[in-house]
Amino acid sequence: MPDESESVVDWDSLTFSFTKTDRMYLSKCKLGGEWAVGSMMDFEDLVISPAAGVLNYGQGLFEGMKAQRASDGSIVLFRPDRNAKRAQEGALRLGMPPVPEEIFLDAVIKTVRENSRWVPPMGKGALYIRPLLMGSGPILGVAPAPEYTFLVFTSPVGPYFKGGITPTSLRVSERFHRAAPGGSGGVKAIGNYAPGMIPSKMAKKEGYSEIIYLDAVNHRYIEEVGAANFFCVKDGVISTPELTGTILPGVTRASIIELAMARGYEVREEKVDVEYAMSADECFCVGTAAVVSSIGRIQYGERVKEYYSGEVGPVTRELYENLTAIQQKRSPDEFGWIVDVE
């Protein structure tokens, strides 16, 4: 392992992209068996059968988490138990053996500790953590794989959107949909993300930061912003799409709801009509990667709605500052969300 004093990366130029780090965690489990504590190893490529369930049938899911440097110099995680529980629920939906919470958390903490030199200074980014669960055993018929691999790797990252909280420009998709009722939209399944690459690329080519998806049944209710959850504010009331199985139950989404309610806001989990969003006072999206990102402009068909003339809305800024202050230990953690790694 490189010397700790060695310069790792130019923190000021970090983007949301992959950088190889030192170590990774890996464990295997047979179908019908039980997970055991895995082992740490140097980061390396995997050897996998061409007939692996994940390659042929997409039997796999992932989580996204961050380790950050706090104001006291410690390294902290944000609500990792929520990621562990979501991964368990997703595993059941996809026919995979769920990883016990204690093993999941142990794997994450060990991986962060052994890659601690890659955690950026506070305010310069974060160490993104990628737990991955997949059917690695060979299978030919459409059925659960005979063996599963659980691994965790990391990468230092900058902001997901180039401007961070700076208002982004989004376009509502009237052609593509992210998920349909009864499907796997509420699971962080690997197969949910490839279909969104082209719509996202098309939007970015047209000058937008990301795309807004509407529901696949009525084509009028907002679901997600690419890979982030959507919120809007009108007359002081905060609204976000309700969890009906077609959108991801985001950890940051749940945290923003709890935080806003604790600050005295009325928060509604409901069907958010795109017309309602177009008449809102401000909009923002949230996620582990995006944190809280202000939406400055939305184009829906030929109409364009500008929010706060390119400035960050007051509710968006308040929630962003409150959340990041807790995550960085700059304010008391009244919710018990923070877990110290070292």
Image: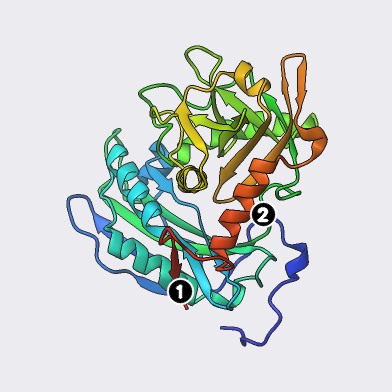
Residue in the image at 46% along x and 36% along y: 191
Horizontal and vertical percent position of residue 246: 43, 28
The amino acid type, in three-letter code, at marker 1 is Val
Tell me, yes or no, if residue 23 can be seen here.
Answer: no
In-image side of 282 versus 336 (left or right): right
Task: Count neighbours of disc 2 (C-alpha within 10 A) and say few if under 14, some if 14 to 19, many if 20 or more.
Answer: some
Which tag is nearer the camera, tag 2 or tag 1? Answer: 1
Quick check: 292 above or below 304? Answer: below
The amino acid type, in three-letter code, at marker 2 is Phe
Question: According to the image, label 1 marks what residue?
Answer: 341
Q: Are marks 2 and 1 in contact (CB under 8 Å)?
A: no
Residue in the image at 61% along x and 32% along y: 233
Quick check: 165 above or below 249? Answer: below
Quick check: 111 above or below 87? Answer: below
Question: According to the image, label 2 marks what residue?
Answer: 16
- Secondary structure of the residue carrying tag 2 is loop
Q: 317 and 296: which one is in front?
A: 317
Residue lying at the far left of the rendered structure: 32
Horizontal and vertical percent position of residue 174: 63, 16
